[in-house]
Image (cartoon, grey):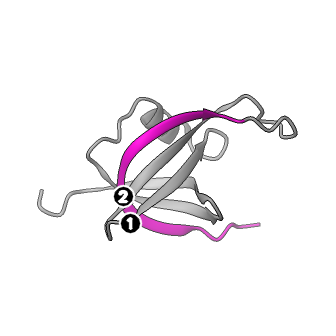
Amino acid sequence: MTKNLSELIGKIISKQPKEVRDKRIPFYGNLYYRLKVLAENEETHIFFVYSNLVNQTLWRAITNSHYADKRYLFRAEKKKNGFILHNWQELKEENA
């Protein structure tokens, strides 16, 4: 089944590491990230990033904070408390 992904352009303004606390799921104890993203329309959005849902290049970029001052096109699944990130594409600055 293909998920209906939303697209949003913005920059990551904060990252918070978290741990899966639900003992009923197989990823209990795994690290994930809660990102705050500032969209181009100045709204902030919450994105959750799980290592089993994104490619390792993206996971390492977030883990090592290699996203600072960069614009991205985020592709994510909308949930009631935020977005679950599936992929992103770095966008070049328009005035660069």
Q: Which residues are magenta?
A: 1-20
Is residue 68 or residue 56 the one in the foreground?
Answer: 68
Residue 90 in the image: x percent, y percent?
A: 35, 53
Residue 51 image point, x, y percent: 62, 38
On residue 78, which mark appears? none
Farthest residue to the right: give it: 24
Using the image as rendered, state which of residue 24 and residue 2 is in the foreground.
Answer: 24
Residue at horizontal 64 percent and vertical 47 percent from the top? 53
Please report whichever mark, 2 or 1, sits nearer to the chain's N-terminal start: 2
Q: Residue 58's x, y, as percent?
A: 48, 41
- Residue matched to label 1: 43
In the rendered structure, which amino acid carries the disc numbered 1?
Glu
| Residue 73 sits inside the magenta stretch | no
Residue drawn where x is 60% and y is 34% of the image? 18
Answer yes or no: do the residues labelled 2 and 1 have beta carbons within 8 Å? yes
Position above or below: 41 against 57: below
Whole-angstrom CA distance, mark 2 to mark 1, is 6 Å
Q: Is residue 12 magenta?
A: yes
Predominant secondary structure, magenta span = strand
Indicate the amino acid at tag 2.
Leu
Q: Which residue is mark 2?
A: 38
Q: Is disc 1 placed on a helix, strand or loop?
A: loop
Q: Quadrant of the C terminus?
A: bottom left
Residue under the point 62% across and 59% down: 81
Quadrant containing the N terminus in the rendered view: bottom right
Element under disc 2 = strand
Q: How many marks?
A: 2
